[in-house]
């Protein structure tokens, strides 16, 4: 069977490329080795963030992705919270970093944000977060429940755009124009490999030249002992040294110094608090960062405890753990993402940072436009 485009991988990058091609009327197939998406795209927080992205291509991709997510949610029928993001400043250094971001970077680059203090902070969730010094409210950020949204997106692409999905099908080899799989041989004018952090099954030699690595995260699903009715994604000023929108501001150095002096284990394990509400009153909490060639299967209970302590303090609420798991994604490349044209008609799309949900839809659109010569 012949297609205009074959995508290998049904994570957010693969589905984004499939959508961009199918909406243009191309005949598209997606191959996935598992029976349903099980990788980074369903193990994450479901935060589609604009506010955290650095100025330039990442911010532009996040803004483009924002509108695509809204369209998908409407057509595929999954929930999408659009009330934004709250970043809490717990210390003076964190507050000064958020203030600098609002006054300089947000004003210069058009981030839609506000800094909440005093009464505005006290009014949030009936005073639940009044113990913090300030909160940055990002208005463009969105929240979804990944483990439900991705299957719904697959169903939409199949039902309304005619995308052919080959699940439980391993792709053994790709060559220009040809895919060899456990379901047989298939042909396509364009093939795009979106295989996440698997750098050894397909296109191993050209991918090795990128010197990619793998990041593993520890994550938890918890139930608050009080119904917080949370509608926003939550971060703290700790994220200011991790996210590109903040990390290169001079004020971030004071936050980093404070971490190293008071809580060096946070730096050692790459811990910065993220909290996402689920549709069922639970919260996804994390995360830590451990980099290497492979992801260790062994979690640290101490790391989980540090994250739970941060979450409990931030929420001012006791939490009960419901579920624990690992997230794994490709990381620390030379750039946050790569679109590698290996040969005519054969490409690979890689995320090398943990922001695929935030920028993936826009990346798919840009890459397909590039393959079709629309940006020439």
Image: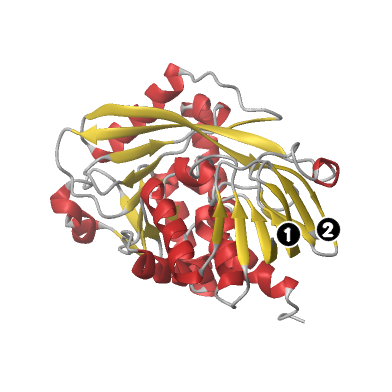
Q: CA distance from mark 1 to mark 2?
A: 7 Å
* Left or right: residue 80 compared with residue 28: left
> For the residue labelled by badge 1, is the local secondary structure a helix, a strand or a loop?
strand
* Left or right: residue 120 compared with residue 50: left
The mark that comes first in sequence, 1 or 2, is 2
In which image quadrant can residue 245 be found? bottom right
Residue 372 seen anywhere in this rendered image of the structure? yes
Image point 50% across, 47% down: which residue? 41
In front of the other: 148 or 338 = 148
Q: Height in image: 62 above or below 330?
A: below
Q: Height in image: 297 above or below 192?
A: above
Q: Quadrant of the N terminus?
A: bottom right
Instruction: Kindly identify which residue carries mark 2.
Output: 176
The answer to whether mark 1 and mark 2 are in CB contact below 8 A is yes
> For the residue labelled by badge 2, is the local secondary structure a helix, a strand or a loop?
loop
Q: Quadrant of the C terminus?
A: bottom right
Instruction: Kindly identify which residue carries mark 1.
Output: 191
Image point 29% across, 28% down: which residue? 322
Residue 111 seen anywhere in this rendered image of the structure? no
What colour scheme was applied to this rendering of the protein?
secondary structure
In front of the other: 301 or 199 = 199
- Image coordinates for residue 233, horizontal then vertical, percent: 35, 51
In which image quadrant can residue 215 be found? top right
- Image coordinates for residue 137, horizontal then vertical, percent: 34, 60
């Amino acid at each position: 069977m012949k297609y205009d485009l074959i995508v290998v991988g049904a994570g957010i990058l693969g589905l984004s490329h499939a959508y961009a091609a199918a909406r243009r009327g191309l005949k598209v197939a997606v191959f996935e080795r598992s029976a349903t998406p099980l990788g980074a795209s369903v193990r994450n927080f479901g935060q589609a963030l604009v506010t955290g992205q650095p100025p330039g291509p990442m911010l532009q991709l996040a803004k483009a992705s924002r509108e695509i997510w809204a369209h998908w949610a409407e057509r595929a029928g999954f929930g999408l919270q659009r009330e934004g993001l709250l970043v809490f400043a717990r210390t003076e250094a964190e507050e000064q970093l958020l203030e600098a971001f609002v006054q300089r970077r947000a004003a210069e680059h058009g981030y839609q944000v506000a800094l909440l203090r005093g009464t505005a902070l006290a009014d949030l969730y009936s005073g639940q977060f009044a113990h913090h010094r300030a909160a940055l409210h990002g208005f463009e950020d969105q929240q979804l429940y990944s483990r439900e949204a991705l299957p719904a997106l697959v169903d939409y692409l199949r039902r309304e755009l005619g995308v052919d999905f080959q699940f439980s099908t391993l792709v053994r080899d790709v060559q220009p124009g040809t895919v060899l799989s456990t379901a047989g041989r298939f042909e396509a004018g364009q093939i795009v490999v979106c295989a996440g952090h698997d750098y050894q099954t397909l296109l191993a030699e050209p991918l090795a030249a990128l010197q990619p690595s793998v990041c593993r995260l520890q994550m938890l699903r918890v139930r608050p002992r009080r119904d917080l009715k949370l509608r926003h994604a939550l971060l703290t000023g700790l994220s200011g040294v991790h996210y590109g929108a903040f990390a290169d501001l001079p004020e971030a150095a004071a936050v980093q110094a404070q971490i190293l002096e008071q809580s060096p284990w946070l730096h050692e394990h790459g811990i910065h608090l993220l909290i996402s509400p689920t549709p069922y009153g639970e919260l996804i909490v994390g995360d830590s960062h451990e980099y290497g060639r492979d992801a260790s299967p062994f979690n640290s209970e101490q790391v989980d405890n540090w994250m739970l302590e941060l979450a409990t303090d931030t929420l001012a609420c006791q939490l009960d753990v419901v579920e624990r798991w690992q997230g794994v994604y490709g990381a620390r490349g030379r750039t946050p993402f790569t679109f590698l044209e290996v040969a005519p008609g054969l490409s690979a799309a890689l995320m090398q940072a943990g922001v695929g949900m935030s920028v993936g839809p826009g990346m798919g659109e840009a890459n397909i436009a590039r393959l079709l010569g629309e940006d020439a």
